[in-house]
């Protein structure tokens, strides 16, 4: 196996999670996890544990929130959010490809006010000084822009419901999560394998729109059935539960945040120091601790650099096609050693050039 997986998603997960998951495929209380009924008490316990751990890691237990594990990916939430929450209009911050996709879906349900956008600069920074109207049904934004490598470090102060796509930085750092009314995240960036999406929603914001909502798209239906309205993605939920347990065993969000900060400063220090590279994000305060994007100043040197990192056992370093260059995704399960290896490769490349 390759040693250092910097892939943007699906992403690196802890080895011990793979081992437990593999074991459960072979034997999970005398059946395979792949063949047990989702209504069996063994799986109901998995679902409850996953929901409880998700709320616990966010500090949202006993605060009126429900955790759901649904199918459909984070992209499904782009429309479910608007379906369930938008009566007339909603405000969106446009900070990247995923914002634009969320905005496109929301426009089918009402008026979208784009409070600010960095699209004209290829999303190389987070817009500043925007104003969120007070007469909207909710405000939606992304904390971390996986493709461009920007991250919003603060929680916007709003008087309207706050809705957030945290797909690529959930459980990576502390935030004041109680300020949020609905948080969603596709599992495959920082929580588990592809196939399930976590939704954490404050129940009292639901049921306020006048339209009819199809059952499968109605949060209240899923809440009333405890994420078992239809067959849930059993295995991705099980692996997510294992990853959330691993996080707890390793000190929780607070401990992982300090490790993530160490990894981020290692790579950004090297990007800034090394003459051959340049960071993609223009405002340093907007740099993502999860996805570091950078380019070679001289792109003709790419073949030599690519050979070096591949030889070092590094995978998934190519940037997204809309940015080019490189992207080092440093999700929770990526070790400090992997980032140290990448930094060494960048230094060796500089010496050889
Ligand atoms: C990957 C990603 C998505 C899309 O997730 P899917 O589960 O593939 O639908 C949405 N938002 C963000 C921020 C992402 O990184």
Image: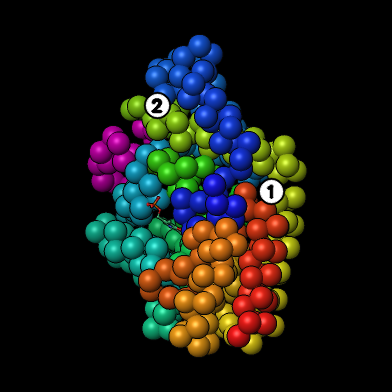
For residue 62, above or below residue 255: above
Foreground disc of the pair 2, 1: 1
Q: Is residue 14 left or right of residue 11?
A: right
Q: Earlier in the sequence, mark 2 or mark 1?
A: 2
| Image quadrant, ligand 1 | bottom left
Give the number of callouts.
2
Q: Is residue 221 magenta?
A: yes
Name the spot of residue 195 as percent of width and height, x first.
40, 41
Pointer 2 residue: 228
Pointer 1 residue: 253
Q: Quick one: 45 or 130, which is closer to the camera?
A: 45
Q: Is residue 137 left or right of residue 146?
A: left
Question: Which stretch is magenta?
Answer: 208-222
Q: Is residue 328 magenta?
A: no
Q: Quadrant of residue 268?
A: bottom right
Can residue 44 be seen at all in this image of the molecule? no
């Amino acid at each position: 196996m390759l040693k250092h997986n910097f892939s943007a998603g699906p992403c690196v997960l802890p080895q011990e999670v793979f081992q437990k998951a593999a074991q459960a495929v072979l034997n999970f209380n005398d059946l395979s996890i792949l063949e047990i009924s989702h209504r069996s008490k063994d799986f109901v316990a998995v679902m409850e544990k996953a929901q409880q751990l998700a709320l616990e890691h966010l500090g949202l237990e006993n605060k009126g929130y429900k955790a759901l594990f649904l199918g459909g990916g984070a992209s499904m939430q782009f429309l479910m959010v608007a379906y369930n929450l938008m009566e007339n209009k909603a405000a969106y911050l446009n900070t990247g490809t995923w914002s634009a996709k969320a905005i496109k879906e929301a426009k089918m349900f009402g008026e979208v006010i784009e409070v600010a956008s960095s699209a004209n600069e290829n999303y190389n920074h987070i817009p500043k000084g925007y104003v969120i109207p007070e007469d909207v049904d909710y405000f939606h934004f992304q904390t971390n822009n996986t493709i461009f490598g920007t991250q919003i470090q603060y929680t916007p102060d709003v008087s309207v419901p706050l809705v957030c796509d945290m797909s690529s930085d959930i459980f990576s750092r502390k935030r004041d999560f109680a300020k949020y009314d609905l948080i969603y995240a596709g599992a495959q960036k920082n929580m588990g394998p592809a196939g399930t999406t976590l939704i954490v929603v404050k129940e009292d914001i639901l049921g306020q729109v006048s339209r009819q909502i199809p059952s499968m798209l109605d949060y209240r239906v899923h809440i009333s059935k405890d994420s078992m309205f239809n067959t849930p993605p059993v295995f991705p939920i099980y692996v997510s539960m294992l990853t959330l347990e691993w996080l707890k065993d390793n000190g929780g969000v607070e401990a992982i945040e300090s490790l993530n900060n160490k990894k981020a400063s290692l790579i950004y220090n090297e990007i800034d120091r090394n003459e051959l590279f340049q960071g993609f994000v223009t405002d340093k305060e907007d740099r993502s601790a999860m996805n570091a994007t950078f380019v070679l100043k001289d792109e003709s040197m790419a073949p030599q650099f690519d050979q070096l990192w591949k030889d070092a056992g590094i995978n998934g370093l190519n940037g997204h096609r809309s940015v080019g260059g490189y992207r080092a995704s440093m999700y929770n399960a990526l070790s400090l050693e992997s980032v140290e290896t990448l930094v060494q490769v960048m230094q060796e490349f500089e010496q050889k050039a």
